[in-house]
C-alpha cells in the first residue's frame, strides 16, 4: 500500500520507479488523490501504471501521429486510426480489416511464446472488429546469426521465433502468406517481431471498439485469467535488462487450440447482430480493454471482479485486473441477448463470465469480495500524459565513400547470393502453412512447383463469390533508414509500392509498424519524427490512406539500440485474381526492360555491407514516377510477361530471382546504365523494376511506356545467366548452380 | 556414457499441450484427471567421461535445448 498523498517528491520518485512512472506522472496521481482525500488502492495504482505506459497511451508518439497522420483518409476507408484495427471498403458489401503490431520485447525474452502470442494477439485485434481473420503477415528482424553473446544465441532466437509463428498460425488455421526476414547486427539479442493480420467483414457486421449503451453486460470469454502475463505492458516500456526477474511473469506460450473455437463462437454471435461493442484483451489486460471500451463510448461500468474465471485462485485483485493472459475477448451485449450468446459459447465449449454492467457515470467502479476497490475517473485514468520530447538529428560526419569492386565477380556473386539477407527464405517460410483456407492465389513462392522463386507480394482471394484479390507485402530497409530517416522511409514505402504493382495490384492502404529505440534520446526521437513525416508525405502524394499503425519504442539494451525500423505493410487490390503477374521469366527470347530510375548509389545496400562502406546520405528518389509506371503497366498489361522490383541485392538479384522460378535465364548487357559495374548491379535505390515483355508485343509496349525511363538490358534464354558490362563478361553460368547456392544460404542456421 | 536430460516448464508457465490433453481426456470421460504436465526427455550417448559429459550436456541444455525464462532441466546419468 502506497501512502501517496503523504509522499514527498523523493518518495514519489522511488515509488514511480517500481511502477514505470516518472516523477511528474506520480505528482499528477498524488494531486488526484489529494483532491479526493484518500490514498489509492493497489489496483488503482496498477491500473494507472498500465494505462499511462508508453505501450498503452503512446505518450511519446501521440503528438506526431496526430500531426502527420490525422488527415490521411480516403473515400473508401471506413475506420482508420480509431478502433482496434482499420476497416477499409473492398466493394459494396465487404470490407477488409487490417492491423499490424510489434511483439518485440516478449520475443526477446522468450522467442517461441513471444512470437506465438504476437500472432494470437493480432488475430484478436482483427476478430474484435467482427471480421473473419483471413491471412497472417510476419516481418522479422534478427541479429547476426553467428552471434552468441546474449543469454540466448541468435540462432536460438531465430529458430524459436519462427517455430512460434509456425505453431500458432498453423494450429489456428490461418495462413501466413507474407512478410520479411532481415538480419542486422543492431538486432543482436533484440529481435523484432511484427505480426499483421487481415480479415474480411461484411459491412453490416462491423463491430466497434466501444460501447455506448447503458445497462449492457460486459462479458469475457475464451481463456481464463492467470498470473501469467502480468506486467507485459510495463515491461515493453522498459529497457531490456539481463537480470530482470519479474520478466518471467510476463511470458506466455499462447494456446491456438482455444483460439480456434473462440473465433468461431465470436463470429457466430456477431452474425446474430447482438454484439454492441467488442475488444480483445491484450496489453494491459482488463485494465486497458475495459477502460478503453467504456471511455470511447462515453459510459462507465461497475465491475464485479469475483466473477472473473481464474486459472489460479490465489491471485490478488490487481493481478486479475492487469493480467495479460492470452485468448480472451471482451464483449458488450444487452441482457436479453445473453442466452443467445450463451448457447453459442456452450456449443463451441468456450468458457465465459459476465464481469459487469455499463452505467452512466464518470467513474469506473470495481468491487471485489464485497468491497469497493476502485473508484476512479475514467477520463483521468485513460487519457494519460502526452510528451513533446526533445529531438535533434544524429551528428553525421560526411563520409566520402570509396566503393571497391570485387576482384573476381563470379566468386563474389557466389558468396553474395548465399548471404542471409539475400538468399532464399525457403527454410523459414516453408514451415508456415500459407495455403490453408484455400484462398492464397499468389503464394510467397512462385514458379515451377518445388523449384520456385520469391514472389513480390502475396495475393489472396478475399470474397467467396467474387474474383477480387488483396495483395500484401511487408518489410523495411533499416540500413537506408539509418543513413537518412526521411529518405530511407521513402525507400521502404517505394519498395512496398513496387512489390504491389509488380503483381498487377493497385496500392490501396498503408499500415505502419514503427520500431525504434529510446524516445528519451533526442536522436532517436528525431529519427521517429522524420520517418512519420516521410510516411505522411508519401501517402499524400500517392493518394494512399494510412489506415492503422503501431509504435514500439525502447527497442534497446543497456548498451545500444536497434537501427530505426519503420515496417510498412502495404495492401493492394486486384479486380480478378486470375490476372496476377508473377516474377519468373515465362518464355525464351523475350526482351527484358529496366523500367524507372535506378539510383547510382550503393547507400544502404547489402553490397555496401559486404565491404563495410559507410554512407552519410541517400539520394532523393522521384517516387511519384511510380504512379505513372503503374498506369502504364495497366495500359500495356497484356504485353507484360513477368515483372519484378529491384530492391535487396539490386539488379543482380532481380535478374536471378526472375530466372530461379523457371528453366530460363538471361543474356544481359548493362553497359547503357549509369555508374560502374558494382552500382549498376547492386544499387537498391530508386523506382526501378524489371519487366519481361512479350516479344510479339514489344512495339506496343514501347509505345505505351513512352515517356518513362526505359533501358533494354537483354533477352531471356534457356538455363544460362550471362551478364556483360562494357565488353566484359561479369558472369556466365548455368542458373541452376547459382540457384542452388541461393536456395541453401540459410541451411547452416535453420 | 549415457546421459538423460529432462526438460519441463517452470511452475508459472502455462503448458498448452498439457491443457489440451486434459481437456480432451475429460471429453472422453476421464473426469478424474486434475492436472497434466508434459515433459521432454533427451538421451545422449557420449564418448566422454562422467565429468566432461555432464559439463558438455549442461552447456547444450542451457544454450540449445532450453530457455531459462520458461524451462528448467535436470541432468542424470543412465546406469545400464
Image (cartoon, rainbow, N blue to C red):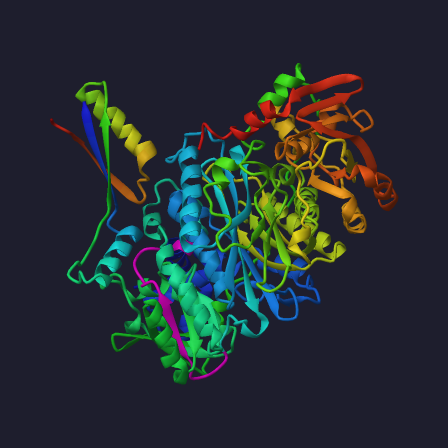
Residue name at image x 38 percent, y 36 percent: A152
Q: Which of A725 and A308 is in front in this view?
A: A725
Q: Please identify the quarter of the rendering in which residue A345 is found.
A: bottom left
Q: Position of residue A276 (x, y in %)?
A: 48, 77
Is the magenta region chiefly helix, strand or loop? Answer: loop
Q: Can residue A213 be seen from the camera position used here?
A: yes
Q: Can residue A30 be seen from the camera position used here?
A: no
Q: Nearer the viewer, residue A378 or A215?
A: A215
Residue name at image x 29 percent, y 64 percent: A1
Q: Where is residue A144 in the image (x, y as percent from the top left)?
A: 49, 31
Residue name at image x 56 percent, y 28 percent: A742
What are the residue bounds of the magenta stretch?
A: A212-234
Residue name at image x 48 percent, y 66 percent: A128
Q: Where is residue A528 in the image (x, y as percent from the top left)?
A: 61, 48
Q: Where is residue A410 in the image (x, y as percent from the top left)?
A: 65, 18
Judge from the rendering whether residue A279 lies leftward or rightward of residue A541; answer left or right.
left
Q: Which of B37 and A734 is in front in this view?
A: A734
Q: In which quarter of the image is the C terminus of chain A?
A: top left
Q: Is residue A257 magenta?
A: no
Residue A585, above or below B48: below
Judge from the rendering whether residue A521 lies leftward or rightward of residue A672; answer left or right.
left
Residue A629, above or below A613: below
Q: Is residue A224 magenta?
A: yes
Amino acid at each position: 500500500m502506497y501512502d501517496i498523498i503523504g509522499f514527498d517528491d523523493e518518495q514519489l520518485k522511488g515509488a514511480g520507479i517500481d511502477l514505470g512512472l516518472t516523477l511528474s506522472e506520480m505528482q499528477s496521481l498524488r494531486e488526484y488523490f489529494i483532491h479526493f482525500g484518500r490514498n489509492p488502492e493497489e489496483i488503482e495504482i496498477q491500473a494507472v501504471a498500465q494505462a499511462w505506459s508508453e505501450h498503452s497511451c503512446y505518450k511519446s508518439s501521440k503528438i506526431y501521429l496526430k500531426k502527420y497522420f490525422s488527415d490521411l483518409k480516403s473515400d473508401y476507408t471506413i475506420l482508420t486510426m480509431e478502433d482496434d484495427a482499420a476497416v477499409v471498403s473492398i466493394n459494396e458489401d465487404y470490407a477488409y480489416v487490417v492491423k499490424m503490431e510489434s511483439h518485440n520485447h516478449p520475443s526477446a525474452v522468450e522467442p517461441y511464446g513471444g512470437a506465438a502470442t504476437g500472432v494470437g494477439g493480432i488475430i484478436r485485434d482483427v476478430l474484435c472488429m467482427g471480421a473473419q481473420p483471413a491471412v497472417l503477415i510476419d516481418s522479422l528482424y534478427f541479429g547476426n546469426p553467428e552471434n552468441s553473446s546474449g543469454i540466448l544465441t541468435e540462432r536460438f532466437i531465430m529458430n524459436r521465433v519462427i517455430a512460434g509463428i509456425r505453431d500458432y498460425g498453423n494450429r489456428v488455421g490461418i495462413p501466413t502468406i507474407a512478410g520479411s526476414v532481415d538480419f542486422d547486427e543492431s538486432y543482436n539479442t533484440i529481435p523484432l517481431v511484427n505480426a499483421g493480420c487481415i480479415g474480411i467483414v461484411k459491412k453490416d457486421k462491423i463491430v466497434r471498439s466501444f460501447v455506448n449503451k447503458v445497462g449492457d453486460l460486459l462479458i469475457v470469454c475464451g481463456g481464463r485469467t492467470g498470473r501469467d502475463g502480468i506486467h507485459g505492458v510495463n515491461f515493453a516500456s522498459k529497457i531490456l535488462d539481463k537480470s530482470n526477474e519479474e520478466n518471467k511473469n510476463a511470458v506466455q506460450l499462447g494456446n491456438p487450440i482455444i483460439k480456434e473455437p473462440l473465433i468461431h463462437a465470436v463470429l457466430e454471435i456477431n452474425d446474430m447482430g447482438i454484439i454492441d461493442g467488442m475488444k480483445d484483451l491484450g496489453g494491459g489486460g482488463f485494465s486497458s480493454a475495459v477502460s478503453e471500451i467504456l471511455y470511447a463510448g462515453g459510459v462507465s461500468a461497475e465491475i464485479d471482479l469475483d466473477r472473473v474465471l481464474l486459472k489460479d485462485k490465489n491471485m490478488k485483485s490487481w493481478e486479475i485486473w492487469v493480467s495479460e493472459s492470452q485468448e480472451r475477448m471482451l464483449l458488450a451485449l444487452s441482457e436479453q441477448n445473453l442466452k443467445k450468446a450463451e448457447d453459442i459459447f456452450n456449443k463451441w465449449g468456450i468458457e465465459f463470465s459476465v464481469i459487469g454492467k455499463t452505467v452512466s457515470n464518470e467513474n469506473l467502479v470495481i468491487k471485489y469480495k464485497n468491497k469497493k476497490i476502485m473508484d476512479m475517473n475514467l477520463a483521468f485514468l485513460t487519457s494519460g500524459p502526452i510528451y513533446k520530447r526533445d529531438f535533434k538529428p544524429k551528428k553525421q560526419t560526411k563520409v566520402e565513400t570509396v566503393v571497391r569492386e570485387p576482384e573476381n565477380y563470379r566468386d563474389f556473386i557466389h558468396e553474395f547470393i548465399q548471404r542471409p539477407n539475400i538468399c532464399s527464405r525457403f527454410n523459414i517460410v516453408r514451415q508456415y502453412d500459407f495455403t490453408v483456407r484455400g484462398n492464397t492465389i499468389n503464394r510467397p513462392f512462385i514458379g515451377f512447383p518445388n523449384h520456385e522463386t520469391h514472389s513480390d507480394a502475396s495475393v489472396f482471394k478475399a470474397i467467396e463469390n467474387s474474383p477480387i484479390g488483396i495483395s500484401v507485402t511487408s518489410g523495411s530497409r533499416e540500413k537506408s533508414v539509418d543513413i537518412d530517416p526521411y529518405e530511407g522511409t521513402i525507400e521502404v514505402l517505394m519498395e512496398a509500392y513496387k512489390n504491389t504493382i509488380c503483381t498487377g495490384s493497385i496500392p490501396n492502404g498503408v499500415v505502419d509498424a514503427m520500431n525504434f529505440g529510446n524516445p528519451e534520446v533526442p536522436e532517436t526521437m528525431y529519427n521517429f519524427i522524420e520517418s512519420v513525416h516521410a510516411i505522411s508525405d508519401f501517402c499524400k502524394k500517392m493518394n494512399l490512406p494510412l489506415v492503422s499503425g503501431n509504435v514500439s519504442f525502447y527497442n534497446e539494451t543497456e548498451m545500444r539500440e536497434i537501427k530505426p525500423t519503420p515496417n510498412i505493410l502495404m495492401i493492394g487490390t486486384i479486380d480478378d485474381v486470375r490476372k496476377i503477374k508473377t516474377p519468373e521469366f515465362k518464355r525464351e527470347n523475350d526482351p527484358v526492360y529496366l523500367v524507372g530510375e535506378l539510383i547510382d548509389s550503393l547507400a544502404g545496400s547489402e553490397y555496401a555491407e559486404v565491404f563495410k562502406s559507410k554512407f552519410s546520405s541517400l539520394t532523393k528518389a522521384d517516387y511519384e514516377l511510380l504512379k505513372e509506371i503503374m498506369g502504364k503497366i495497366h495500359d500495356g498489361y497484356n504485353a507484360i510477361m513477368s515483372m519484378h522490383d529491384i530492391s535487396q541485392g539490386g539488379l543482380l538479384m532481380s535478374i536471378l530471382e526472375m530466372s530461379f522460378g523457371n528453366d530460363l535465364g538471361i543474356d544481359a548487357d548493362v553497359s547503357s546504365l549509369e555508374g560502374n559495374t558494382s552500382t549498376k548491379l547492386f544499387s537498391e535505390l530508386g523506382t526501378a523494376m524489371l519487366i519481361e515483355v512479350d516479344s510479339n508485343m514489344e512495339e506496343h509496349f514501347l509505345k505505351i511506356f513512352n515517356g518513362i525511363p526505359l533501358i533494354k538490358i537483354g533477352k531471356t534464354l534457356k538455363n544460362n545467366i550471362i551478364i556483360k558490362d562494357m565488353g566484359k563478361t561479369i558472369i556466365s553460368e548455368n542458373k541452376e548452380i547459382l540457384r542452388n547456392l541461393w536456395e541453401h544460404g540459410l541451411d547452416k542456421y535453420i | 556414457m549415457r546421459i538423460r536430460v529432462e526438460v519441463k516448464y517452470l511452475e508459472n508457465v502455462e503448458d498448452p499441450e498439457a491443457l489440451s490433453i486434459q481437456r480432451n481426456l475429460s471429453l472422453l470421460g476421464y473426469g478424474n484427471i486434475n492436472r497434466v504436465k508434459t515433459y521432454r526427455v533427451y538421451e545422449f550417448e557420449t564418448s566422454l567421461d562422467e565429468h566432461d559429459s555432464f559439463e558438455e550436456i549442461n552447456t547444450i541444455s542451457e544454450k540449445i535445448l532450453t530457455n531459462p525464462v520458461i524451462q528448467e532441466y535436470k541432468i542424470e546419468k543412465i546406469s545400464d
